[in-house]
Image (spheres, grey):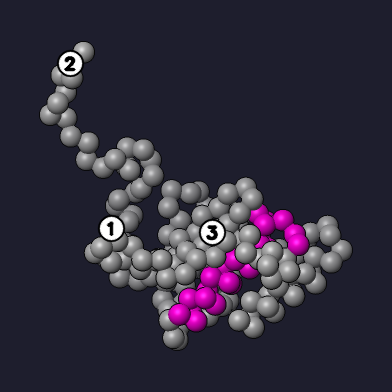
């Protein structure tokens, strides 16, 4: 069968597949700030700090919530507490590689965000680590959810405090 649409040009393949919002990406690139990319799944959180270069984006640092297990975290890695600690870990790593504070812009991609959700818990972790993030404080989860007080495990708050101390000691 012959292709009758030989001259048809697809402009942006990632746009067609629903993976990239190029208008939003252009705004991020024009700001010339480091992007804090926050991605979530049911069992994991990913926080990457990325700089744009002509050759391609360069990942300055990255943190996954599964890395918290090495620091003594024994709870579920897909909850709000793990998101906060993952953001804290990524921020500490960024400040270790870049001396001083760094300005970042939040890149949520095509995800839906909710006030007090896991995405904003990770952003709160970035902010608490010393990274300069311009975001309204009203979107962050309450402190009870970040400390693990709402969890049913008896030792949840102790585990969170231990891991937080390990991250801040880095």
The quadrant where residue 168 appears: bottom right
Q: Is residue 23 left or right of residue 39?
A: left
Quarter of the image containing the C terminus?
A: bottom right
Q: Which residue is mark 2?
A: 2
Spot occupied by residue 64 in the image (x, y as percentages of width and height): 57, 61
Quarter of the image containing the N terminus?
A: top left
* Magenta stretch: includes residue 19: no
Q: CA distance from mark 1 to mark 3?
A: 22 Å
Viewer can see residue 143 = no
- Asked whether disc 2 touches disc 3, contact meaning CB atoms under 8 Å apart, the reply is no
Q: Which residue is mark 1?
A: 26
Q: Which residue is mark 3?
A: 46
Q: CA distance from mark 2 to mark 3?
A: 45 Å
Q: Is residue 23 left or right of residue 168?
A: left
- Magenta range is 74-97
Spot occupied by residue 92 in the image (x, y as percentages of width and height): 54, 77
- Mark 2 or mark 3: name the one nearer the start of the chain: 2
- Mark 2 or mark 1: name the one nearer the start of the chain: 2
Spot occupied by residue 136 in the image (x, y as percentages of width and height): 51, 68
Helix, strand, or loop for circle 2? Answer: loop
């Amino acid at each position: 069968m012959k292709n009758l649409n030989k001259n048809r040009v697809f402009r942006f393949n990632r746009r067609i597949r629903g993976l990239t919002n190029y208008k939003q990406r252009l705004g991020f690139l024009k700001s010339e700030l480091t992007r804090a990319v926050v991605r979530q799944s049911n069992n994991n959180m990913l926080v990457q700090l990325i700089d744009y270069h002509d050759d391609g984006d360069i990942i300055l640092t990255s943190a996954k919530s599964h890395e918290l297990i090495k620091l003594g975290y024994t709870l579920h890695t897909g909850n709000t507490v793990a998101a906060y600690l993952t953001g804290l870990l990524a921020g500490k790593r960024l400040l270790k590689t870049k001396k001083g504070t760094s300005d970042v812009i939040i890149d949520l991609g095509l995800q839906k965000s909710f006030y007090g959700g896991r995405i904003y818990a990770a952003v709160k972790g970035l902010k608490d680590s010393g990274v300069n993030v311009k975001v309204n404080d009203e979107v962050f989860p309450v402190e009870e959810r970040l400390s693990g007080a709402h969890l049913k495990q008896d030792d949840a708050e102790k585990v969170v405090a231990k891991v937080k101390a390990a991250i801040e000691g880095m």
